[in-house]
Amino acid sequence: MDKRLPGLAEAVSGIKDGATVMIGGFGGSGNPIELVHALIDAGPKDLTVINNNAGNGKIGIAAMIEAGMVRKMVCSFPKSSDAQAFNTRYLAGEIELELVPQGTLAERIRAAGAGIPAFYTPAGYGTELAAGKPVAEFEGKHYVQERWLKADFALVKAELADTHGNLTYRMAGRNFSPLMAMAATTTIVQATRVLEPGGIDPEQVHTPGIFVNHVIEVTDPQQEEALIRAGAHYERA
Amino acid sequence: MDKRLPGLAEAVSGIKDGATVMIGGFGGSGNPIELVHALIDAGPKDLTVINNNAGNGKIGIAAMIEAGMVRKMVCSFPKSSDAQAFNTRYLAGEIELELVPQGTLAERIRAAGAGIPAFYTPAGYGTELAAGKPVAEFEGKHYVQERWLKADFALVKAELADTHGNLTYRMAGRNFSPLMAMAATTTIVQATRVLEPGGIDPEQVHTPGIFVNHVIEVTDPQQEEALIRAGAHYERA
Amino acid sequence: MSELKLTNAQIAWRAAQDIEDGAYVNLGIGFPEMVAQYTVEGRTPVFHTENGILNFGPAPAPGEEDWDLINAGKKAVTLKPGASFFHQADSFGIVRGGHLDVAILGALQVAQNGDLANWRVGNKGVPAVGGAMDLVHGAKRVAVLTDHVAKNGAPKLVEECSFPLTGVACVTRVYTSLAVIDIEGGKFVLREKLAEMSMDELQSLTGAPLHVEGDVGELSVPEL
Amino acid sequence: MSELKLTNAQIAWRAAQDIEDGAYVNLGIGFPEMVAQYTVEGRTPVFHTENGILNFGPAPAPGEEDWDLINAGKKAVTLKPGASFFHQADSFGIVRGGHLDVAILGALQVAQNGDLANWRVGNKGVPAVGGAMDLVHGAKRVAVLTDHVAKNGAPKLVEECSFPLTGVACVTRVYTSLAVIDIEGGKFVLREKLAEMSMDELQSLTGAPLHVEGDVGELSVPEL
């Protein structure tokens, strides 16, 4: 079993118009920038994108939005230091937004990966974000019923991978990535180093390979925050 | 912050009659035998015990049952190579059993730790173990609503701990322990080695210290399976 | 063969032929564990055990056991390169979440709609379920290994299970000592049978109608 | 003091006095983050950030940032010995599951029953909620830091919130620029006020009745 693919273009070539795509990362940490830019080169349209944020600056998800690839964002916090790409289109009614409390977003993704179709959370009860959702009382407290959130694809950035797809993440770059890897039909990983099986201590695996379909080595990955601070701009080649 | 306690007796002294106690371990792996035996010495009665099994041989949970400490077992698989202690009392109607499918048991404990009062699972739908539980249909499939499972105390065996309570587990000894540590009001850990803060790489922590209340170093812990094979028998000192 | 049926080893061998290279597989405790021994040359399935390991290997040599390294049957195992450990909520997330390619289980009875009974015979004794009720949900294929009939001669493939259910409409394929049968649209569909056995005889040993759709192959296995 | 009210730094200082040694604390983005600067000498609280770190420390020196090591406000942080990383489902398990001793948040409005509005003013613009709706549930104490009145002079402590709610009946204590107020039994209970301010004046700046139960202490903070 060897889940490696030779390049980023091959990795994202299966992502077609209308797909739902989870993208790991929180703020500038853990974003699989190289995979996202390869997806911009591939250019599918009408995507639903799931990420904590809705893009920042002129790279990554913001550049996907600029390129007109995104029909809908599912996120908790579409504001960023430069959220112009999303904001402009959202206020013009050109892009849809499903706003989800961050913990609920994480739990809905985890539920999808774990085969739990619905669960109850206190978050959002009595607020406009829970409008229309079923509510229930348990032990004297009110809760909102939330549904799992699945995707066709997950794009994930790891620090180490092995050829079976076992992963470790770097510091707080972990964030949503282990959950998204579970929740997507096809999980595509860019890793700074890809090792032979046995290269990662079995006790230290953060994401078991069963959740991973494809692994691409990107040896010197870029950091979203650094790119944005440098004023980087990504456009289809 | 230093969560160390000097000895096992101090660690379990807060566990009183009528308490609900989760005990980590699966079969012979990951059982905090020294903590359980300290609890037998302390001798609280009327306990509800949550573990995957219901004791084996004449040590650990089986010895707790022998000592008449256990009112109710919550478990998935009360059968073992020598389950005499539980079987005799169960068939005589002297001990209560709540039988829970293993994955549901794990998820109910995790839900308690994560503040999720209820969730839906396909496991058990249409069977006698789901009798009387609410059911619901999602996307054409039927599911059973299950509730969180909390405890007053969790007894857990770790490989490494630091004084903040950060833990790592050894191999498949991990099993239910990270979940139980989240789900109990008070989590008591026996660890083979207790290190200073920083002794465990932050990326390799299996259970963050926030879930742990007390840590006791037990430098040469016994293994349940080995004790049972040696015919060991534990009785209050 | 002393009688006209496969041995357990032969049933396990037949099931192993359907496990593809790289498949993620959970083998139920006991009889289904034999499937691992007959892994097809050149294929490397990854075995999952619900107590929290992926990619474990066979038992260690006697005396080499590490009792923190066991499978769901509480037997000592070994690790293969690329193994991983995880807690039980993640482990059953693997099961329920649809990540396994195949789960292979034993059976007391299988009904024509895919209902499975495999955890207890009646209401006597101490009940124990383990992961059985979880394992029947989620895997892309849920297969059963079983003798075609019970020791008392009663059919194990039935219209409706009389024993307590493990799961509803969950089994997708049954490997028996006489046949390979798919469950499709609430019916038993015969895929393979022993060449020496007539359709009539096979039907007489089966508690619900066997349907034929397309060819019925020969259930052919080596001496083991 | 140029006017009779505490500065933000002083409000943060007062809140910090209630954080016990070893407490697990989540500080909301912005103003609440200042609380960490005023940690009481000899106490070592552990700070949680919902993107997945326990026991992070202050910002690194400029140029020393590692952008994989950030807090929920996307600012670079450092680690203290005993830190740990985890994914966001575990991180919000810490929040929802009741494991934090205190969460400290900003507020647009707080109602006398503990309802909090702090995520958006109206229906215009791009809405963004982040972890606000999760953080108000689960912590043993949910405290708010706020000016006592809004910039336009309108009370921020009110009978009922007019802005969209973040959570229902969730706030347990409010630290304002004029007072420390607990929420108990659906009422504002005054615990401390600035010595120079009369009860009548404080009440006139508050949008719902202030109740007194026992002594009202002096809200006394250092120059900062």
Image (tube, coloured by chain):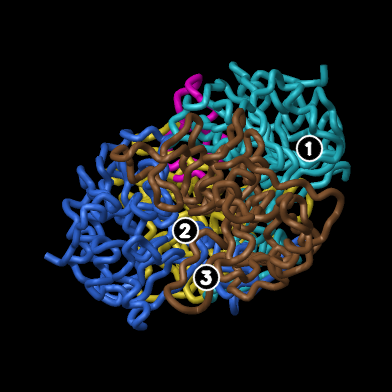
Chain colours: A cyan, B blue, C brown, D yellow
Q: Disc 3: which chain? A: C
Q: Is residue D10 above or below residue A45?
A: below
- In magenta, the rendered stretch is D48-77
Instruction: Name the quarter where the C terminus of chain A is drawn.
Output: top right
**In what element is the residue under mark 2?**
helix
Q: Is residue D155 visible?
A: no
- Residue on which the image places disc 3: C120
Q: Residue at x 59, y 50 (%)?
A: C1
Tell me: B176 left or right of A180. left
Q: List x then y, in percent, for residue B78.
A: 40, 66
Q: Disc 1: which chain? A: A
Query: Residue A143, located in which quarter of the rendered image?
Result: bottom right
Q: Which amino acid is tagged 2?
A: Gly
Respond whether the residues carrying marks 2 and 3 are from the same subunit: no
- Residue on which the image places disc 1: A86
Q: Disc 2: which chain? A: B
For residue B113, which numbered disc appears in the image? 2
Q: Is residue D122 above or below residue D71?
A: below
Tell me: B192 left or right of C100. left
Respond whether the residues carrying marks 1 and 2 are from the same subunit: no
